Image: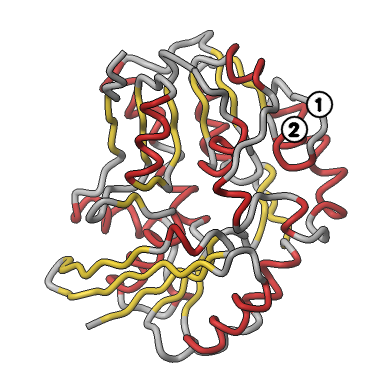
Amino acid sequence: MKRVVSVSLGSSKRDHSVQLELLGQKITVERRGTDGSLVKAAALLRELDGQADVLALGGVNLHLRAGDKLYPLRDGQRLAENVRETSLVDGSGIKDVVEARIIKQLVQQQGWPKPGQRVLVVSALDRWRLAESLETAGCRLTIGDAMFALKLPLPFHSLRTFYAAARLTLPVLCNLPIKMLYPLGKKQETSVNCWKGFYERADIIAGDFHFIRRHMPRWLPGRSIITSTVTSEDREFLRDRGIKYLVTTCPNLQGRNFGANVIEAICIALLNKPLQQIKPVMYTAILEELGWLPVITKMDNGR
């Protein structure tokens, strides 16, 4: 039996494990949170190195993307240094492949997003291809990286403008502690009343769920969410706020939509090849064979 483990800087309350049989192979999948502790995450990675078949990094990326250029993220790279034997991924390959196609699928199947619809992208640097696809579809973007990561009231409304700013600032930002850029540990369980107007003006909110959840207003009827990592409790959270549609880019595995990092790790395990021989385009064939397509859920908010 193969073993896939996600080591996350997120809350341990969101831990989950499943046993799956996929394409004739049995796989155990675990998510283990370290409540924001880089020290615990590093120790856990060292412990699992050579023991798990594939490791996934959660709560921090190895790189941030601006256009076609990747910028190494200091804390992600430092954690990766603890892994010497086992393949380690952060989900960026799945984000580039799956999320680059999801908007076309939504347009074909649901008739939205429509040109002119307003979309709040909470972090384009984390999901550049998703933001790019939304802009190509004619949506009016509000790019929230400066707001959600840096707490600065500085929205961007085009990827071209944001790209120019990102190229100037990323060499510095990527060296900041990840806790300054992203909610970790208990912060993933609490909400902050901030950026309410940007949510209320948007038809669609897209991107990382922890950013979305942390700042979401109490009542947001009729909006749609495009994200990945959600638990059954997260679904209730969104339903209680009047969300109309939830689009998850990854499948529901026994009650939990794992993050892109876990899905990429599962693909690596199934491909059974050295990481250096694998290209993200190979994930498409695996996901299609598994029937793992983005899931569109119409929420019944009961109001």
In the rendered structure, which amino acid carries the disc numbered 2? Met
Vertical position of residue 176 compared to residue 228: above or below: below
- Judging by the rendered image, the residue that carries numbered circle 2 is 147
**Quarter the N terminus occupies:** bottom left
**Mark 1 vs 2: CB contact within 8 A:** yes
- Judging by the rendered image, the residue that carries numbered circle 1 is 153
Question: First in sequence: mark 1 or mark 2?
Answer: 2
Rendered location of residue 150, percent (x, y): 79, 41
Image position of 29 (left or right of 174): left
Vertical position of residue 198 compared to residue 20: above or below: above
| Residue in front for this viewpoint, 137 or 3 | 3
Tell me which corner region of the image, top left, top right, bottom left or bottom right, holds residue 277: bottom left
In the rendered structure, which amino acid carries the disc numbered 1? Pro
Residue at 69% x, 71% y is 77
Tell me which corner region of the image, top left, top right, bottom left or bottom right, holds residue 283: bottom left
Residue at 24% x, 49% y is 292
Residue at 53% x, 65% y is 8
**Quarter the C terminus occupies:** top left
Secondary structure of residue under mark 1: loop
Rendered location of residue 236, percent (x, y): 35, 35
| Residue in front for this viewpoint, 208 or 280 | 208
Rendered location of residue 58, percent (x, y): 53, 62
